[in-house]
C-alpha cells in the first residue's frame, strides 16, 4: 500500500478539509445505518455486519483482517510516518423486540441456545457506531494529503455480553494490529443529537453480576422447626446488602448494589432446600469494586452461618465489565479539538452507570484511551421534555424497545467526532 508522499502540501485546517468530503458520502452512510438497523445480529453472530464493514474498508483501500475473536474486523491504513490511531466500534445488537414504528425497524428473530425464538434489535446504537466509523475511515482514506500516520478501524463483536474485547485479544489482536498510540471510541446516548460530551477520569462504571445460591434444609411448611429456611436467609441477605453503599462507603463514593432476581420454592406449603439470588454491582474504581465484592461475600456467608445453614453459599460471577476510566491528557486533547470544531455543542458529560468492555483493548496494548458520548435524540423532542421536566419519562434510553437515534444530525456528528479526534494525533492541528 503506497505511503503519502512527503512533499504533498498539507492543508491549513486538516479536520475541515477531510470533513468537506462528508457531503459526498452522507447518503451512503445513512443507507448503511438503516440497513444495519434493519438487520441486527447478536454477539458473536455478527457475520453480515462484519462483512459489510470489511467490504467498505477494502473498497477504501484498507488492509483488512476478518474473523478476529470470531467476527471482529480490523482495517489498517498506513499513510506515511506518524502516530498510530485506533478507533473502535461495537457491532452487536440485543434480544429486544423493536417498538419504534420506524420504516426500517427490525423484524429479525433468531433462536437462543435452547431453540426458542428470540427477537433482535439494535437497541443500544451499535449500528450508529459502525456506520460512523466506516464514514470516518472513508473520509480519511479520501484525503491522505491532510494527515500522516496510520489509522486503524476496529469493529468489535459481543460488547453486550462483555466478552468480545477479550475474545479479540485472546485471538491475537495485539500481534495482528499495529500498536496504537491511542485508542478512541464513542457511544450514542440519550442526549440531544449534535451534542458530543467528553469526561476525563471515571466515565462508565464497572459492572459485576453475581449468583448467590443459599443452601438450607427443606421441610413441610407446617414444620419450620425441621427446616433451615433458605427463603428467610436470602431475605436477610437482601436487606443486609443495602448497607454496603449506605454504611460502608463514603457518601461521595458512587456505587450501586441491586438484587434483580430471587427464586426459591415451588409451592406455598413447602420450605425449599435452596434459594438463588442474582445481583448486579456498579462501581467506578477498582478499590471500591474490590471492597463491595468482598462485602457481598462476607454478608452472604455471615447470614448463612447465623441461620445454621448446612453448607456455605455458592457465589458465582456471571459477567464482569471493567470500569471505563478515561486518560486525562488524552481526553483533554480530544476535548480541545471538539471545542474548536463543534463550539457550544462540545460539552462535559456526567458519569454514566452503563458499562463497557472496550477498555480491555487499550489495556492489552498498554496505551491510553478516551471514550466520549454522542447525542442521538431529536433536539426538539429533548428540549420539550426538558422544559416539562419529563426527560426520564419521555426520552427513550439505551436498551429500550423504543430507542432509535435520529438519523441526522446523529450520523454527521458521529462521523465528524471520530475524524476530528483522530486528526488531533494524525494531523496535530486545530480543526
Image (cartoon, rainbow, N blue to C red):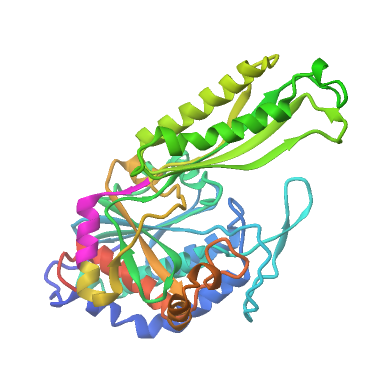
The dominant secondary structure in magenta is helix
Picture mark count: 0
Position above or below: 181 against 387: above
Q: Which residues are magenta?
A: 324-336
Name the residue at 86% across, 27% down.
221
Q: Which residue is nearer to you in this view: 197 or 394?
A: 394
Residue 341 in magenta stretch: no
Which image quarter: residue 419? bottom left
x, y (%) of residue 372? 35, 60
Q: Which residue is nearer to you in this view: 353 or 227?
A: 227
x, y (%) of residue 113? 73, 46
Q: Can residue 426 be seen? A: no
Name the residue at 31% across, 75% down.
142
Classify residue 281 as left or right of residue 372.
Answer: right
Q: If the image is split into quadrants, where does the C terminus sit?
A: bottom left
x, y (%) of residue 348? 29, 63
Position above or below: 409 against 422: below
Q: If the image is split into quadrants, where does the N terminus sit?
A: bottom left
Amino acid at each position: 500500500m503506497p505511503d503519502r508522499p512527503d512533499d504533498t502540501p498539507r492543508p491549513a485546517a486538516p479536520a475541515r478539509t477531510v470533513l468537506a468530503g462528508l457531503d459526498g458520502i452522507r447518503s451512503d452512510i445513512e443507507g448503511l445505518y438503516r440497513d444495519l438497523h434493519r438487520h441486527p445480529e447478536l454477539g458473536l453472530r455478527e457475520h453480515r455486519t462484519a462483512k459489510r464493514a470489511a467490504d467498505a474498508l477494502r473498497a477504501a483501500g484498507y488492509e483488512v483482517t476478518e474473523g478476529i475473536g470470531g467476527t471482529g474486523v480490523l482495517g489498517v491504513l498506513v499513510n506515511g510516518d506518524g502516530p498510530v490511531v485506533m478507533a473502535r466500534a461495537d457491532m452487536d445488537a440485543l434480544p429486544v423486540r423493536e417498538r419504534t414504528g420506524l420504516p426500517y425497524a427490525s423484524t429479525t428473530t433468531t433462536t437462543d441456545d435452547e431453540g426458542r425464538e428470540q427477537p433482535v434489535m439494535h437497541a443500544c446504537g451499535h449500528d450508529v457506531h459502525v456506520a460512523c466509523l466506516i464514514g470516518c475511515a472513508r473520509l480519511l482514506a479520501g484525503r491522505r494529503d491532510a494527515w500522516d500516520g496510520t489509522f486503524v478501524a476496529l469493529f468489535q463483536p459481543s460488547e453486550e455480553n462483555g466478552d468480545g474485547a477479550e475474545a479479540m485479544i485472546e485471538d491475537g489482536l495485539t500481534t495482528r494490529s499495529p500498536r496504537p498510540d491511542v485508542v478512541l471510541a464513542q457511544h450514542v446516548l440519550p442526549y440531544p443529537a449534535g451534542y458530543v460530551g467528553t469526561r476525563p477520569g471515571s466515565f462508565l462504571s464497572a459492572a459485576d453480576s453475581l449468583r448467590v445460591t443459599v443452601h438450607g434444609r427443606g421441610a413441610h411448611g407446617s414444620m419450620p422447626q425441621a427446616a433451615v429456611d433458605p427463603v428467610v436467609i436470602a431475605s436477610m441477605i437482601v436487606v443486609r446488602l443495602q448497607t454496603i453503599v449506605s454504611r460502608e462507603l463514603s457518601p461521595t463514593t458512587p456505587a450501586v448494589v441491586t438484587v434483580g432476581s430471587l427464586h426459591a420454592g415451588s409451592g406455598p406449603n413447602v420450605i425449599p432446600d435452596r434459594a438463588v439470588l442474582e445481583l448486579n454491582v456498579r462501581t467506578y474504581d477498582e478499590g471500591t469494586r474490590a471492597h463491595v465484592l468482598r462485602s457481598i461475600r462476607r454478608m452472604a456467608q455471615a447470614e448463612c452461618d447465623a441461620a445454621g445453614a448446612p453448607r456455605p453459599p455458592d457465589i458465582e460471577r456471571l459477567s464482569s465489565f471493567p470500569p471505563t476510566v478515561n486518560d486525562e491528557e488524552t481526553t483533554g486533547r480530544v476535548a480541545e479539538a471538539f471545542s474548536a470544531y463543534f463550539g457550544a455543542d462540545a460539552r462535559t458529560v456526567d458519569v454514566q452507570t452503563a458499562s463497557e468492555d472496550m477498555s480491555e483493548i487499550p489495556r492489552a496494548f498498554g496505551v491510553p484511551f478516551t471514550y466520549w458520548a454522542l447525542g442521538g435524540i431529536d433536539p426538539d423532542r429533548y428540549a420539550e421534555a426538558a422544559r416539562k421536566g419529563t426527560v426520564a419519562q419521555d426520552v427513550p434510553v439505551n436498551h429500550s424497545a423504543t430507542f432509535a437515534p435520529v438519523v441526522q444530525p446523529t450520523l454527521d456528528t458521529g462521523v465528524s467526532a471520530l475524524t476530528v479526534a483522530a486528526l488531533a494525533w494524525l494531523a496535530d492541528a486545530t480543526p
